[in-house]
C-alpha cells in the first residue's frame, strides 16, 4: 500500500504558490496520463481526469493546487507521523488522497471526475475553477462533489460568504505645527475601528451547523510625510457572513455600521464578493459518506468553492485531511492518521456507492 504521508510530502515538495502552479500541474499530469482508465483534459493550469464507464452517477473529487505564500516553511519535513510544510494541510493531503484514488481505483461504482484547479487562494476573479467552467462547463457536470479542503476527516458543510470592502476617508492637509487648519484623515479611522472591534457578531445555526460570523479590519494605510496632516486614509475590511443572509443583506449591514463614521467625501467600495452556501448534504452519496463512517458534521467557517458548485446546481461538501486551524500558518502540518482516515472513507464510497 502507498505511504500516503510520503506521497503528501512529495506533493508538498512541488512548490505551487498561487499563479505559479504550472510545474506542479505538469507533474500531476505526468502521474495520470499513462493510466488507461482516465481521460485527461488540460485547460490552462487546470487539470481534469474522468472515468467514462457509463455509471448511473458521477461524483466529482475537487481540489485546488495552489498554496498561500511560503512563510519560512517551504518544502516537506516529516517528524514521526507528522508532515510539516506550506500546503500540507491546505490542501495537499487532500490532493494526495485524490491522486492515489485516481491511480488505484480503476473500476469505481460511480463515474469519477477528478478536478485539480488553480488559484483558489486569491481573489475570486482569478479562480481556475471559474476559468474551467467558462471554457468547458461539461467537464464539471456531475451528481455531487466532495472538495478536499482541510476538515481533519470530518464533514464541514456549506461555507460562509466573504465580502471585502475598501473605505477611503477624506481629510485636509495642513502643517503639523498648525493642525487645526486641516483635518486628519488617519485620526478619523478611530471611530471606524472601534465600531468594527465592538461589533457583536452572529452565530446562527442552520441545518444543525453553527456558523460564526466575523468582521475584521485587515489593512490600513495613510500619511504623507512626518510634518503633514494626512488628507487620505484607507481601511480594508473583511466580512465573513453566514448563509442565512444574502450577500446584499451582509453588505447592507456593514454599510449601516460604517455610516455614522462617514462623510459625503468618503467612499466605501466592495472589492471582492464570494457568496455563502448553506449545508447541502441531502444527496445519497454524501449521506453515505457521513453515515457509513459516522462522521461529525459541522459548519465551514471559511469560504470554499462549495458555494461555486451550488451556483452550478451541484450539491457539494468539504471533506479532507488536515486541521483547518493550522492552514495558512507558519506551523502548517498534517498527521498521517488524518490522511489515512480521509482516504479510507473516500475509497469505500467510490467502490461501493
Image (spheres, helix red, strand yellow):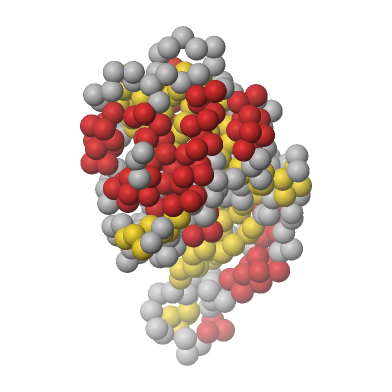
Q: Residue at x 41, y 59 (%)?
A: 82
Q: Residue at x 23, y 32 (%)?
A: 30
Q: Residue at x 67, y 54 (%)?
A: 213
- Decide if residue 238 is in sight here: yes
Picture quadrant where residue 214 is located: bottom right
Above or below 331: residue 41: above
Q: Quadrant of the N terminus?
A: top left
- Decide if residue 277 is in sight here: no
Q: Residue at x 46, y 21 (%)?
A: 108
Question: In x, y percent, where is residue 340?
Answer: 46, 45
Q: Nearer the viewer, residue 160 or 250?
A: 160
Q: Nearer the viewer, residue 185 or 61?
A: 61
Picture quadrant where residue 119 is located: top left
Above or below 167: residue 245: above
Above or below 117: residue 134: above
Report the residue that reaches farthest toward the front. Answer: 1
Residue 79 left/right relative to 178: left
Q: Nearer the viewer, residue 264 or 70?
A: 70
Residue 351 left/right relative to 24: right
Residue 249 left/right relative to 87: right
Report the residue that reaches farthest toward the top. Answer: 54
Question: In x, y percent, where is residue 93?
Answer: 42, 46
Picture quadrant where residue 239 is located: bottom right
Question: In x, y percent, where is residue 179?
Answer: 53, 84
Report the residue that reaches farthest toward the bottom. Answer: 177
Question: In x, y percent, where is residue 135?
Answer: 38, 22
Amino acid at each position: 500500500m502507498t505511504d500516503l504521508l510520503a506521497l503528501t510530502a512529495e506533493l508538498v515538495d512541488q512548490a505551487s504558490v498561487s499563479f505559479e502552479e504550472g510545474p506542479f500541474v505538469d507533474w500531476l499530469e505526468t502521474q495520470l496520463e499513462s493510466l488507461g482508465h482516465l481521460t485527461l483534459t488540460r485547460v490552462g493550469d487546470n487539470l481534469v481526469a474522468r472515468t467514462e464507464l457509463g455509471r448511473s452517477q458521477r461524483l466529482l473529487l475537487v481540489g485546488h493546487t495552489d498554496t498561500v505564500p511560503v512563510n519560512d516553511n517551504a518544502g516537506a519535513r516529516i517528524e514521526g507521523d507528522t508532515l510539516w510544510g506550506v500546503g500540507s494541510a491546505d490542501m495537499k493531503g487532500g490532493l494526495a488522497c485524490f491522486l492515489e484514488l485516481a491511480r488505484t481505483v480503476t473500476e469505481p461504482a460511480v463515474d469519477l471526475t477528478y478536478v485539480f484547479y488553480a488559484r483558489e487562494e486569491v481573489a475570486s476573479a482569478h479562480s481556475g475553477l471559474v476559468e474551467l467552467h467558462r471554457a468547458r462547463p461539461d467537464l464539471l457536470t456531475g451528481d455531487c462533489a466532495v472538495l478536499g479542503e482541510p476538515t481533519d476527516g470530518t464533514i464541514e458543510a456549506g461555507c460562509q460568504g466573504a465580502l471585502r470592502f475598501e473605505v477611503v476617508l477624506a481629510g485636509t492637509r495642513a502643517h503639523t505645527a498648525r493642525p487645526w487648519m486641516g483635518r486628519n484623515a488617519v485620526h478619523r479611522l478611530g471611530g471606524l475601528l472601534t465600531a468594527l472591534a465592538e461589533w457583536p457578531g452572529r452565530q446562527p445555526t442552520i441545518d444543525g451547523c453553527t456558523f460564526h460570523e466575523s468582521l475584521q479590519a485587515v489593512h490600513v494605510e495613510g500619511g504623507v510625510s512626518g510634518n503633514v496632516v494626512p488628507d487620505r486614509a484607507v481601511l480594508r475590511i473583511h466580512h465573513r457572513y453566514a448563509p442565512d443572509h444574502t450577500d446584499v443583506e451582509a453588505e447592507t449591514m456593514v454599510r449601516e455600521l460604517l455610516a455614522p463614521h462617514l462623510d459625503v467625501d468618503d467612499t466605501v467600495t466592495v472589492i471582492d464578493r464570494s457568496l455563502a452556501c448553506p449545508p447541502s448534504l441531502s444527496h445519497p452519496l454524501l449521506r453515505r459518506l457521513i453515515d457509513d463512517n459516522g462522521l461529525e458534521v459541522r459548519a465551514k467557517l471559511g469560504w470554499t468553492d462549495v458555494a461555486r458548485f451550488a451556483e452550478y446546481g451541484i450539491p457539494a461538501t468539504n471533506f479532507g485531511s488536515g486541521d483547518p486551524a493550522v492552514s495558512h500558518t507558519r506551523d502548517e502540518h498534517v498527521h498521517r492518521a488524518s490522511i489515512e482516515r480521509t482516504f479510507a472513507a473516500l475509497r469505500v464510497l467510490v467502490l461501493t456507492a
